[in-house]
Amino acid sequence: MNKLLAGLMSVLCISGVAQAQSNDWPTQKTIKMIAVFPPGGSVDQVARILAPALQNQMKQNVIVENIGGASGSIGAAAVSRAQPDGYTFGVVFDTHGVNENMIEKLPYKTKTDLTTVTMIGTAPMVLTASKASGITSFKQLLADAKAKKANNYGSIGTGSLGHLALASLAKDAKFDWTHVPYRGGGPLMQDALAGHVPLAIGSLFLVKPHVDSGGVIPLAVTTSKRSPELPNVPTIAESGYPNFEAPAWWAIIAPAKTPAAIVNRMHEEVAKALKNPEIAQRLKSQGIEIAALGPKPAQDFVNKQIDVWGAFIKANNIKAAD
């Protein structure tokens, strides 16, 4: 009886602490948003677009900290280890849905050690060519590939959606393409602009500024429909590979035991920020279609990504080390 009473008191105490945290949040200390890729990439940019708006709305400091590496898993691991008090969140990319099945000895379980706060939105991935490559169109690239000409393509990392999308295409079409993984969008685009890697695939958010400046040549997009931001760039689907579709996506995560009241409140604040005309336009101009899915549908979305790409990774024996 005494043990039962002690257990009940413990549960009530924990519940009381969580309720107190929820009631005080976010007045106690600075909120940290961990961008799980290095500076310069789309995750970093999305985090830095949202942080000032959230700070203004919540009247609390919101800072961005970059913890990159291992396709975003190092930053996600830092989020999973953080106190679940509502003062640490993460901004993740589509790699978040594949790391569970890609990386051996991942130091967390994506579905149980982390919770999804908001699925921010989606965007096309864009396959680009460096000016030094001599490739000027997807049609030319396909002709080269069908003629058994080897080529290298860079992505933001092994297991990124760009990597898996092109690995899927190369396997189905029997193209001799070799994947070159980078530690994020910034380093990838630096090498693409310098001509060190002939092909690069990244989100429209990441590559569009370099397309606009003429630094790289857009060849194709991975969505089923053309992007309004690049209306003259064909889809892979319309270029002879029907049903091909692989959009990029971004989400906000938190430690799994973060109180539901805080998770819901943070989602409300993010959704409010995404409705801000200036922020919405900045994201839209980079090709992001805002979704603002709440915790339950966002978590369902992430879980489906884990299951779908997990099956592809296992079926094709894709390993973290290229």
Image (cartoon, rainbow, N blue to C red):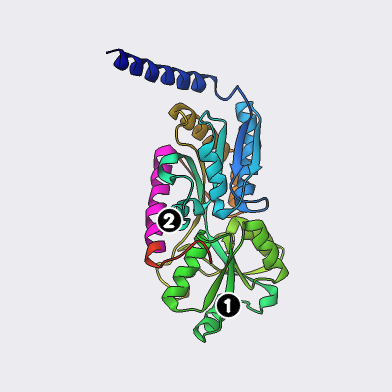
Of residues 224 and 133, the one drawn nearer to the viewer in this rendering: 133
- Is residue 76 rendered to the left or right of residue 52? left
Q: Is residue 297 magenta?
A: yes
Q: In the rendered structure, find residue 101 and report the number of the disc placed on it.
A: 2
Q: CA distance from mark 2 to mark 1?
A: 27 Å
Query: Quarter-wise, where is residue 269 in the image?
Result: top right
User: Can residue 244 be found in the magenta stretch?
Assistant: no
Using the image as rendered, state which of residue 302 and residue 79 is in the foreground. 79
Residue positioned 55% across, 55% down in the render:
71
* Res. 305 mark: none
Residue situated furthest front in the rendering: 2
Q: Residues within 10 Å of mark 2 (few under 14, many from 20)?
A: many
Q: List the single residue furthest toward the bottom.
A: 147
| Residue 140 in the figure: left or right of residue 175 | right
- What are the residue bounds of the magenta stretch? 294-313
Write down the residue under mark 1.
151
